Image: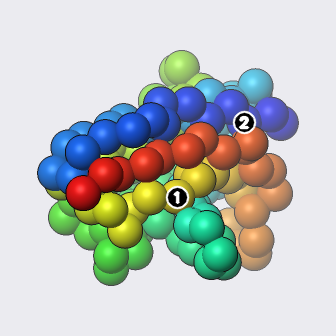
Amino acid sequence: VQLQASGGGLVQAGGSLRLSCAASERTFSMNRMGWFRQAPGQEREFVAAIGWSGSSTYYADSVRGRFTISRDNAKNTVYLQMNSLKPEDTAVYYCAARVGRAGGYDYWGQGTLVTVSS
């Protein structure tokens, strides 16, 4: 499975961006899809995840209420709508896919850079 993340860019604080993650195979077969991010000099951290049907979503405390994850299995794509962006949201954002019901993520995309200016 290949994952292609896109949609990153430069935005001012308070602005919005929508990231997309296109999968080479049916996302319907992926139990969970997620977004992670890694800021310069920091470890990669969890941002958001969504269950296979889209009815279950999970967020890091730092983004809850500002970010929304969604998936369109017909398009094999997962989205991350990011609103009210802050400079501390600056990072490379990665999408990932997990096949099983538990455990780590099996597939990772190449990352897309989000830069939020103050």
Residue 42, label in figure: none
Q: Quadrant of residue 38?
A: bottom right
> How many neighbours does mark 2 have within 10 angstroms: few (below 14), some (14-19), or many (20 or more)?
many
Q: Amino acid at mark 2?
A: Leu
Q: CA distance from mark 2 to mark 1?
A: 18 Å
Query: Picture coordinates of residue 1 (x, y %)?
Result: 83, 36
Position of 16 relative to 31 (above/below): above
Residue 84 image-quadrant placement: bottom left
Residue 71 visible in the snapshot: no
Number of numbered discs visible in the structure rendering: 2
Residue 102, position as x, y percentages in the image: 70, 73
**Disc 1: which residue:** 91
On residue 3, the disc is 2
Give the percent coordinates (x, y) of residue 56: 39, 60
- Quadrant where the C terminus is found in the figure: bottom left
Residue plotted at (47% across, 65% down) = 47
